Image (spheres, grey):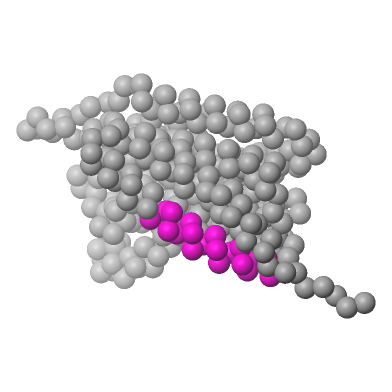
Amino acid sequence: MDINYLLALQNLRDATGGVLNTFFEYITKLGETSVIVFFVGLVYWGLNKKQGIFLMFSLYTNRIINGFIKITACVYRPWIRDARITPVPEAMKDATGYSFPSGHTANATSVWGGMAIPAKDGVKCPKWFSVILIILVLLIAFSRNYLGVHTPQDVVVALVIGAAVLFLMSKLMPIIDERPNMDIWVMLGGVALCVLLILYAALKSYPTDYAADGSVIVEGSKMAVDSFKNAGMGIGFFIGWFIERRFIKFSTDDNTANIIRLIFCVLTYTALDHFAGVGADALIAAGRNSGITKALAEFVRVCYFVAGASAFTELILKFIPKKTENK
């Protein structure tokens, strides 16, 4: 039934000459990790730190859960399951790993949905804008079906899990704020969960299916790389969050400092993101384990994103004289 639904959407694309393809390609990009992280950085570094932390807790918790489910269910992408499915080529570039549940939908629910739910002392969006954000989440979820890279159950489950994580984080964040020493246990628990995901991804067996000519259709170990990456992201976040909370403690109350921090953090993170990717590709080309290498690259990226960039900014701000009011 799910394949029939995708075929119906495919027929619609063909019948309309792909007139909506470009629109949904842009919509689906709003669920890509790179776009999502960039937006979270704008909020975290330059708008409202509390809201940024809330979004990151939701995002990386969702990524960890997504990593566990993907390599447990081991559901192939729609075009692997049924050769009649022909996805929009542009959408296939980021459709890596197993299909269930949808990572783009999880990202969108965590961040765009998270902006619609104000964190404690966070950004409070007008109701009309919150409605637009919820519609955007649903459009991103539908775009994964329309473009032919995910089945309905992939996006529905991702939406449900994402909403549940948002609810959980809305309850957990105030408790962490009220109990300062709880952060170390949250950090240790999060890192332990990510290490467990790495071990699970490395040691479990994966299904192997063969084509008529005897070639392997899908190599399970390669499909698990996304789960390694999610684990690396999670470790980077929990350690970075703990370091920032205990030792850096920057504030987004000063607009001038926010602008300086935002410019510096965006520039340095963009550079680090590029070199981390180049370094990881070089190590993989040299024969290093692709999963562990990707996990390490994501750890470096996210830890710098959460703690490193703001730490360097705070050092810079100490050398900038503050304006004093005349009394």
Is residue 267 one of those drawn in magenta?
A: yes
Q: Is residue 144 left or right of residue 130?
A: left
Query: What residue is rendered at 29% in x and 52% in y?
Result: 92
Relative image position of residue 82 (x, y in whole percent): 23, 42
Quadrant of the drawing holding the C terminus: bottom right
Is residue 275 one of those drawn in magenta?
A: no
12 and 327: which one is in front? 327
- Res. 143 image quadrant: bottom left
Query: What residue is rendered at 32% in x and 51% in y?
Result: 278
80 and 95: which one is in front? 95
200 and 1: which one is in front? 200
42 and 65: which one is in front? 42
Residue 41 in view in this figure: yes
Relative image position of residue 155 (x, y in whole percent): 45, 46
Q: Work out whether 17 lies above or below 235.
A: below
Residue 171 in view in this figure: no
Q: Which residue occupies the extreme front position in the image?
A: 319
The magenta region covers: 256-274
Q: Which residue occupies the extreme left position in the image?
A: 213
Label total for image: 0
Q: Work out whether 270 lies above or below 171.
A: below
Q: Work out whether 170 lies above or below 22.
A: above
Relative image position of residue 218 (x, y in whole percent): 22, 35
Q: Is residue 185 left or right of residue 278?
A: right
Query: What residue is rendered at 46% in x and 44% in y?
Result: 300
Magenta stretch, main secondary structure class:
helix
